[in-house]
Amino acid sequence: MQETVNLQQSLLLTLTGKYGFSHGEVESILPHISLHSASRNQVVKPYVHYESKLRIILSGIGGYFVRNNKGDDLCFYFAMPGELFTDFKSLFDQKQSRIELRAIKKLETADIDREIFVHFTEKMEHGEKIRREATEKLFADTLEHYLDLLTLTAAERYKLLFEKHPDFTELIDDLYLASYLGIKPQSLSRIKNQFLKTKGSK
């Protein structure tokens, strides 16, 4: 019961603080929002499916995945608390997508059906703000990560990630971190060990 209350408070803070919803807008949209949980590694939205939900992460970490021609699942983006966790392209164009969404760490999300969200996007000023800011952030972060893959060494990419999110090494499995960094888990292990040695010697 207390956990539900905490999640509801987190949702209210996200809507009012992060996205600037007014009290009236919050009251209008809350009845259409449901809370959902996903255990670690659980698929939230499978490959080759339509996206039907807009999700706000209240706690935990979500991962965006694609599958390469070898059948390997590659993580290319992490979504954190307060961020949206949705296959935006599929949500908007309603076409099947090659993207899969999974819970990296146990997830608690606030979900709203696509049709309801589209309605609020059209009728409410801040509905459009959610859509615009979320897609802009995903595009900017993904582009920056892509450029890092092209221009930085694996060790440099790990150092940069550690500086931005020092808790990632504890919260996210090496398999997912290695995939995100574009390297094998064995290479990540060597890089982590070398990084810790260098950090400890300073």
Image (spheres, rainbow, N blue to C red):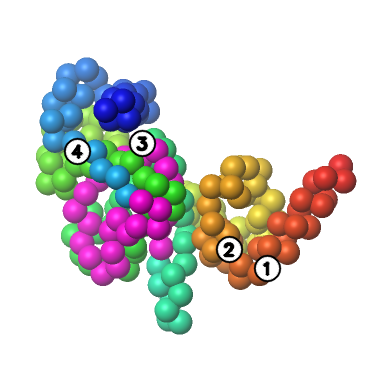
Disc 2 designates what residue?
178
Reply above or below: 98 against 88: below
Question: Residue 6 lies in what quarter of the image?
Answer: top left
Sequence-earlier tag: 3 or 4: 4
Q: Is residue 178 magenta?
A: no
**At 68% across and 63% down in the image, what residue appears?**
189
Image location of residue 81, percent across then percent down: 41, 38
Q: Secondary structure at mark 4?
A: strand
Cβ–Cβ under 8 Å for marks 1 and 2? yes
Residue 58, numbered circle: 3
Disc 4 designates what residue?
34
- Give the spatial CA distance, label 2 vs label 3: 25 Å
Image location of residue 173, percent across then percent down: 54, 57
Residue type, numbered disc 2: Ala
Q: Secondary structure at mark 1?
A: helix
**At 42% across and 43% down in the image, what residue appears?**
60
- Give the spatial CA distance, label 3 vs label 4: 12 Å
- Can residue 139 be seen by looking at this rendering? no
Sequence-earlier tag: 2 or 3: 3
Reply above or below: 164 against 175: above
- Give the spatial CA distance, label 1 vs label 2: 8 Å
| Number of residues whose C-alpha sits closer than 10 Å to that of mark 4, classed few (under 14), some (14–19) or many (20 or more) | few
Sequence-earlier tag: 2 or 4: 4
Residue type, numbered disc 1: Ser
| Number of residues whose C-alpha sits closer than 10 Å to that of mark 2, classed few (under 14), some (14–19) or many (20 or more) | many
Image location of residue 49, percent across then percent down: 23, 65
- Give the spatial CA distance, label 3 vs label 1: 33 Å
The span picked out in magenta is 39-65
